[in-house]
Amino acid sequence: MKVHDNLHGFTLLREENIEEVNGIARVFEHDKTGARLIYISNDDDNKVFHIGFRTPSDNSTGVAHIMEHSVLCGSRKYPVKEPFVELAKGSMNTFLNAMTYPDKTVYPIASTNDKDFMNLMDVYLDAVFYPDIYNTPHIFHQEGWHYHLENKEDPITYNGVVYNEMKGVYSSPEEVLQRKIFQTLYPDSIYGEESGGYPENIPDLTFEDFAAFHKKLYHPSNSYIYLYGDGDMDAHLKYLDEAYLSQFDRADIDSEIPTQVPFEEMAVASDSYPIPSDEDQKNKDYLSLSYVLENEPTFEDILAFDVLGHILLGANSAPLKKALLDLNICKEVDYAYSSSMKQPYFSIVLKHTDEKYKELFIETVEKTLEDLVKNGLDKRSVEAGININEFMLIEGEYGSYPKGLMYGLEMFDTWLYGGDPLSHLKYRDAISKLRMSSENRGFEALIARYLLGNPHQAFVSIHPDSSLAEKKEKSLSDKLEAYKRSLSPEELDDLVADTQALLERQNNEDSPEALESIPKLSLDEINKKARKVVLYEEEFKGHKLLYHPGYTGGIAYVKFYFDTHTIPQEDLKYLSLVNKIIGRVSTEDYDYERLNQEIEISTGGISSSVETYDNIKESGCYESKFAIKGKAVGANVKRLLELIESTILRSRFDERHLIEDIVSEIRMNKENQFLMGGHTVSVQRLQSYYSQSARMFEELGGVEFYQFLADIDDHFDERWEDLSDKLKEVANTIFNKKGLIISITGDKELKEPVLEAVGRFLENLPDRDLETYGYHFDLAVKDEGFMTAAKIQYVSKGFNIRELGYSYNGSMLVLKSILAMDYLWNRIRVQGGAYGAHFGINRAGELYFASFRDPNLSKTLDAYNEAFEYVENLEVSRREMEKYIIGTISSKDVPLSTALKADAADTMYFNKTTQEDLQKERDEILGTTNESLRSTAAMIREAMDKNVLCVIGSEEAVRVAEEEFKEIKYIK
């Protein structure tokens, strides 16, 4: 095909062979509508599609976010209440979601199955172009907001999924700070507004404005379409043109993003954030210094500033972060950089400090940057920053996210603003230019231009206010009470009727005809064989070796699993702290700045963790390991292991100031997790009431560990000497040959050189005959209600089915899908307004329910307690059962890189899962029947009757439901 050739109504504007993605990238424009399209053709079977729209909003009502939720609630061809959920039930998708950004909304999908890929694409395209929002205002009320009044005597409340989600978001001081930074840096731009919706502003959005937003912006002329993988480009373009795009005419859509006029001098602003009423407010301020950078940057600009941020603030040894930490005026120094904007910003943040240090903060930043420009950045720091970015780009490891998806999302950083989208794929050229620029003081020039010589900056502070949450709640209550008083009896009747009508719609099931409109695969198209786990158990120099051959592009992955049982039970919290400190302090070989440089120059990173593995064969048995792992290209494996050796054997635990900073930082991260990821914390906590392994995890990373950490942080001076001695003792004990297991992953030709390097590493590892300890924790069902300043809840309840006499069966995963996508979705998300709810069950027997950013507490517990009745009466049609089975199998078949497959195989080794277990589980999933599902009802009822629960939520909600708990307390 030649440039400018026409294919199914698309004109080819550009074609390039791009080595980094092993494929050909083609840029098209749709002739009739002007829709932009990029197609990357290669041999990756994990195909990706997304359609995005530029969606600027000049207010903080969250219209873009509410629209993202709402278009996926029924459409012209798919007239069901939740096509998104119905798709997830019966699809082999590897990704299915939607995202709202400050200036765009993106709808991505991915699948390895050709038919499934087309099905997903069609449902999403019909959703965005022909949503049911115009015919069904209840969608807006459910997903956005509505006045909720079930009975005339009740108080009126606001409810809605996005409304409650954003209440949860703004429970975090970090989010409050970021919003204020954006308001201050971009007062005349859309970036000064909250595209997700600010809770106080969301109820200002009318249905008319909501509908007008879609009518204006959700048009092909305002769209950005992306396809990636081994799909049939000819068929895909033909389908896009004939099925959707050709139905529209080109439109002149004003979605331009106004540029914020640069400031002539620093702006200053402040705000408050909520904290619990019993919390000390001293030294809890957040201070930030932020800058607006280049308008519409190139990929080289984006990459350069990404590297620069890492050089300046990416580690405690980084020069700007170190200078700020050395002032000893805050608990943590952080930074933020976003290039997903027309005018990117860069922000430096001090956490838990006092505003009286404002001038010292600003002066230190300016002086440090001036010195760096004058004297030059450390050349090895620059080399390290470039190398670690290059390694990540070459590795292309994005966890569970398909790499083709990430390529497409990253393109928006330039594509949306008229720049070159393909530049993001050609990172080798960009890295090469960066290296050449660094030789000519390129990074120093960036500092001088965008940080020192840039008046478009803002100093923003936020301050704790223990009465803020109560004041806001009172203000909202008064407002709604006044609104209710303003209504006539007839208007109140109408409001009750509207609420009941919404509830009725939410409770009504879709008709079989409507459900059949959702395309699905058949069971015949599903692989009946479980994924093959490749793990070779070998011996190497007297140690167990877990070997994982596979293509890794020349990168070797090495892990060492040390036996935690050489550490006494009372020292497990110190072991966890050792895990978080090593690699962040000096060793006897390198000071901590040089250590960080050497790791980033020679490797792809070194990390560690302490893990527990439940034995699926023997109830109550588990293993625990301290794992240290690293990755490097083959030629650098020897160097990787030298650095690991230095880190684990010769770390210095006498660096008081460094360790104090690390402790404070970990503490703050845990506190933020309570507010933003409380569902994970609450589930882990409730399982620790009855599970030995979960109780051990509490020592290593749960609430117990947080309380230990907070005590050290609050009394660091008096605890320091004993702490230092204990950390040395624990580190000297754990890193020992006794019980060591080795794991290596990589191309076959790497095995021998890697083992040669491992052999040298083992020679230097201590070989002591150490005592080993058994762990036993006193367990007690505490039924705790933890109070925070948040205005939403994380509600968890569960028990272990093994202790009730039941055993795990693969069909329970199908039940998990049904409960999550039907019962809990309707009861807790759709009707209750929570952002999400989950049902969990695993081979170890752990069963739990959990909600996420939930406005309710008691109602949610009622839903959990009544779940068994729903299961007792399950009667799923054959078609729907097939959908649930396919969706469940899909979660088992998500494509994984060789490195992630190795991680999964190691986990199976430690928890005693075999290939036969995987196949048995898959057979049980495929053989699921209504009878096998209904047979679990008694199990769920008995688990709920144990009444084991843990809640993290607002003080008001927890106190109102006080009778549910044995203990209520503040989590901090």
Image (cartoon, rainbow, N blue to C red):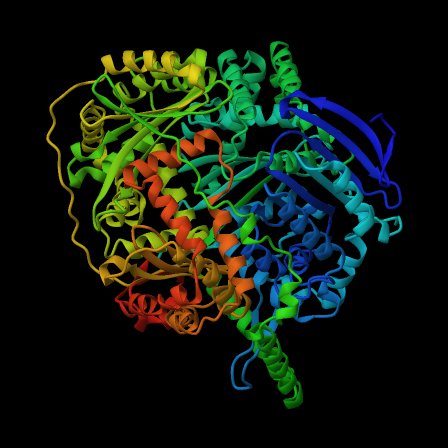
Question: Residue 372: x, y in percent?
Answer: 54, 17
* Residue at the spot 51% in from the left edge and 38% down from the top edge: 895
**In the rendered image, is residue 636 in sight?**
yes
Q: Nearer the viewer, residue 265 or 901?
A: 901
Q: Nearer the viewer, residue 372 or 598?
A: 598
Looking at the rendering, which quadrant does residue 303 occupy? top right
- Asked whether, in this view, residue 93 is left or right of residue 716, the answer is right
Residue farthest bottom in this picture: 489
Answer above or below: position of 703 versus 604.
below
Question: Residue 281: x, y in percent?
Answer: 40, 51
Question: Residue 696: x, y in percent?
Answer: 24, 45
* Residue at the spot 85% in from the left edge and 26% down from the top edge: 3
Looking at the rendering, which quadrant does residue 962 occupy? bottom left
Q: Nearer the viewer, residue 860 or 702?
A: 860
- Asked whether, in this view, residue 105 is left or right of residue 600, the answer is right
* Residue at the spot 84% in from the left edge and 30% down from the top edge: 13
Q: How many numbered marks appear?
A: 0
- Asked whether, in this view, residue 793 is left or right of residue 208, the answer is left
Answer above or below: position of 72 versus 257.
below
Q: Nearer the viewer, residue 631 or 535?
A: 535
Pick the quarter of the image with the N terminus: top right
Answer above or below: position of 516 versus 487.
above
Question: Residue 589: x, y in percent?
Answer: 31, 12
**In the rendered image, is residue 597 in sight?**
no
